[in-house]
Amino acid sequence: QTLVTQEPSLTVSPGGTVTLTCASTTGTVTDDYSPNWFQQKPGQPPKSLIYSSSNRHSWTPARFSGSLVGGKAVLTLSGVRPEDEADYFCLLHFGTAQLVFGGGTKLTVL
Amino acid sequence: EVQLVESGGGLVQPGRSLRLSCAASGFNFDDFAMSWVRQLPGKGLEWVAGISWNSGRIGYADFVKGRFIISRDNAKKSLYLQMNSLRAGDTGFYYCSKAQSGAIKTGLTDWGQGTLITVS
């Protein structure tokens, strides 16, 4: 069974920088896995932040950036704001038509 | 503005069936792949199933294969999920989501508000 792993929780100070990672039990994450990143706040549906590894949507603040580093998909938040406190999920594509979410990272801004 | 409105959720007994619908508006529905995603109470997101723009490619999560069927009607701008043999572990919110393009792999760009299914 394919698993996608993320840090369960991270804490960052306002104004700081934090890196969230997304790894696959199948091996190195590449562009072929089409990594996506989502933000979810309590009581709300998820919101797409990054698609295809590093592409922002028009609504995605510039302080969010996606990349591939060390065989993992990475979401970097720079200049963190209190409103960035949320759950963050990555999504990877496998095979011909299967998507798998990571377990999510609870980001605390403190 | 992209709008996705799910319906069909509710309380259902174990072993019974339910059909979810998602009405789409604000974009050319037949150009985009669509997916269903669920969130069990207090848990993370689980991709359930996806369908390409022309229904030529369909995929399912391992945990639903054989029980759920995803389909779409481009003329009606609607996405469906037929859920059979429901279990208590299927209880949760079910979201309809639009991909970035016609292929399932391009992610989940827009989301509906979700519909709650309770199996009890």
Image (cartoon, helix red, strand yellow):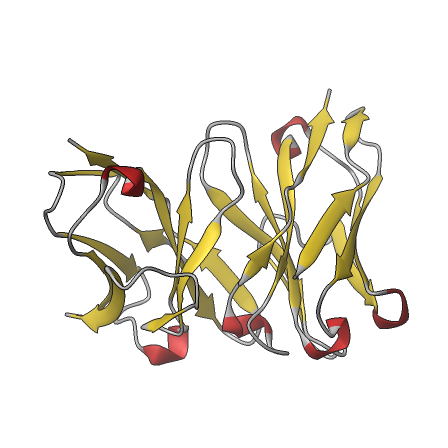
Residue A1: tell me if it is visible. Answer: no
Q: Please determine whether, in this image, residue B53 is positioned above or below residue A38.
A: below
Give the quarter of the figure containing the C terminus of chain A. Answer: top left
Q: What residue sits 24% from the left and 71% below the top?
A: A67
Give percent across and percent down for residue A26.
33, 66
Q: What residue sits 52% from the left and 47% below the top?
A: B46
Give percent across and percent down for residue B3.
69, 56
Residue farthest along the right direction in this orientation: B75
Q: Please determine whether, in this image, residue B92 is positioned above or below residue A19.
A: above
**Which sits in the foreground, A26 or A7?**
A7
Image-quadrant location for residue A96: bottom right
Q: What residue sits 11% from the left and 46% below the top?
A: A15
Count the numbered circles shown.
Answer: 0
Q: Is residue B85 left or right of residue A29?
A: right
**Which sits in the foreground, A55 or A69?**
A55
Residue B90: tell me if it is visible. Answer: yes
Q: Please determine whether, in this image, residue B48 is positioned above or below residue B108.
A: above
Image-quadrant location for residue B86: top right
Give the quarter of the figure containing the N terminus of chain A. Answer: bottom left
**Which sits in the foreground, A43 or A71?**
A43
Give percent across and percent down for residue A28.
25, 71
Q: Is residue B82 left or right of residue B91?
A: right
Give percent across and percent down for residue A101.
44, 53
Q: What residue sits 64% from the left and 78% below the top?
A: B102
